[in-house]
Image (cartoon, rainbow, N blue to C red):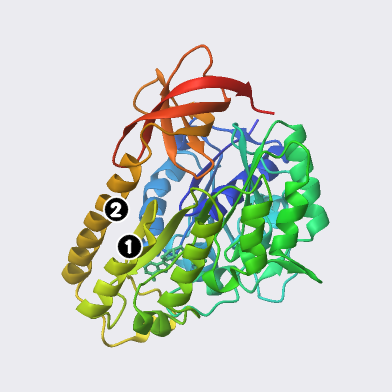
Amino acid sequence: MRRFVIETWGCQMNVHDSEKMAGILGAHGYRPAESAASADLILLNTCSVREKAASKVFNRLGALRRLKARHPDLLIGVCGCVAQQEGETIFRRAPWVDLVMGPRNIAHLGALLEQARTDGRSISLARDDDPITFPAETASRAPGPRAFVTVMEGCNKTCTFCIVPYTRGREVYRPAAEIVREVRDLVSRGYCEIELLGQTVNAWREGETDFAGLLFMVDRIPGVRRVRFTTSHAGHLTSAIMRAFRDLPTVCNHLHLPAQSGSDRVLRAMKRGYTRGKYLAKIEALRRDIPDMAFSTDLIVGFPGESESDFHATLDLLRAARFDQVYAFTYSPRPGTPAAAAKDGLPEPVKLERLQRLLAIQDEVLAERHKALVGRTFEVLIDGRSRLDDGVAKGRTRCNRIVHVPVTASTRNGFLDVRISRAHAHSLTGEPLEATPAA
Ligand code: SAM
């Protein structure tokens, strides 16, 4: 029997793509290997959003070359966004690679493997107009109560910093009937929290049905207890979607809404298509209507030309929006994107210093928000044990806060009402009140 390892970089989209790849490999007779050293096939599922993405992949390929020298039958594949971006260059720079596959080509993985074994090499990169299949029925998902479901691929935005439209292509929406079928199947297998995925997930549509309509359909599937979705774009956050947060019982009161910057000047240069005022107005409207609505965001620090006062506008946004989680990145030029040609890039130390200041303010905001939760009770969906202490279970509230509870007879995987007893920098501790089974 052949064994495989998939090493995954990047976002939830990539994590779920790896689940789809694992499912296809399972159907071709492969089973997971304990480690790369005992694998017959190693796939690197790569991400090109982060700095030095390609060089990190080539470094890893350098280490895998030694493994291949010891096991000549080992197949090595590069998948995901770096594969799409670098294409044939990967074979030239790392001739021991057998397979290169872009993120829109996952459905072809089985055929590509056959070809790599017989012809010695295979490659499949997507063009924008290629039809796309969503090989979701075969995905091999992580155990637990939560499951990812792809609703769209690609991105039609033209954000000047972002590589995603170049690597993942134009938007393609998955038919609603397919999405609903997959969710029903997941519920029948015990999953009860569904996270809908897409690069601009709330741009999904099918004929007259928009993303709010899709949320309505998923909400009505018996057995679905929680619905989340990521990543949303503020420009597509319609009032219908905002009403869905209020009216649909399964839609969780948490939204990941990347702001990228708090400065209108920078937002314009990034071509984000919204202003700070419009962004904040949507957050405030949701907060008014939905109890305990929580927000997380992505921010880029040190975009070309970002002045100290632009940066201050981002710090002010942190104080005004009171996010529960911030993913902050220093700007890094991505090859081929418009911003990469900018002449007014900031020195690395300036970007890093701003990042530290931003994170310090966010820590203050979060400490205040967490402190206010002590003594309150939340429904927590337990999904495993703490990484640091096996006597502690961990789960998430509907508003996506991580809560740790001592393991007791009532703490099995499932829903638990928990009273918050202590607030920490990035999590909460609580005491369970009562337990109900997951499904
Ligand atoms: N589609 C989403 C959007 O546009 O809001 C997310 C795209 S990306 C996969 C995730 C995050 O990486 C972005 O929200 C952004 O904050 C960050 N990112 C993307 N390109 C970047 C760059 N060139 N430099 C630094 N951070 C970047």
Q: Residues within 10 Å of mark 1 (few under 14, many from 20)?
A: many
- Locate residue 371 relative to residue 202 in the image: left or right: left
* Residue 239 quadrant: bottom right
Whole-Å distance between the Cαs marked 2 and 1?
A: 8 Å
**Which residue does the numbered mark 2 point to in the structure image?**
365
* Residue 129 quadrant: bottom right
**Which quadrant is home to the C terminus?**
top right
Residue that appears at 25% across and 61% down: 358
- Locate residue 163 relative to residue 139 in the image: left or right: left
Is the Cβ of the residue at disc 2 closer than 8 Å to that at disc 1? yes
**CB of residue at label 1: within 8 Å of ligand 1?**
no
**Which residue does the numbered mark 1 point to in the structure image?**
318
* Kind of residue sitting beneath label 2: Val
Q: Is residue 51 visible?
A: no
**CB of residue at label 2: within 8 Å of ligand 1?**
no
**Which quadrant is home to the N terminus?**
top right
Ligand 1 quadrant in view: bottom left
- Locate residue 237 relative to residue 129 in the image: left or right: left
Provide the secondary structure element on which disc 2 rests: helix
Residue that appears at 71% across and 55% down: 215
- Residue that protrudes farthest toward the top in the picture: 409
Q: Is residue 231 visible?
A: yes
Residue that appears at 72% across and 72% down: 130
Residue 436 is situated, as x and y percent measured from the top left of the image, at: 62, 22
- Earlier-in-chain disc, 2 versus 1: 1
* Kind of residue sitting beneath label 1: Leu
Provide the secondary structure element on which disc 1 rests: helix
- Residue that protrudes farthest toward the front in the picture: 288
Residue 97 is situated, as x and y percent measured from the top left of the image, at: 51, 55
The tag on residue 156 is: none
Residue 191 is situated, as x and y percent measured from the top left of the image, at: 67, 35
Judge whether 24 appears above or below 284 on screen: above
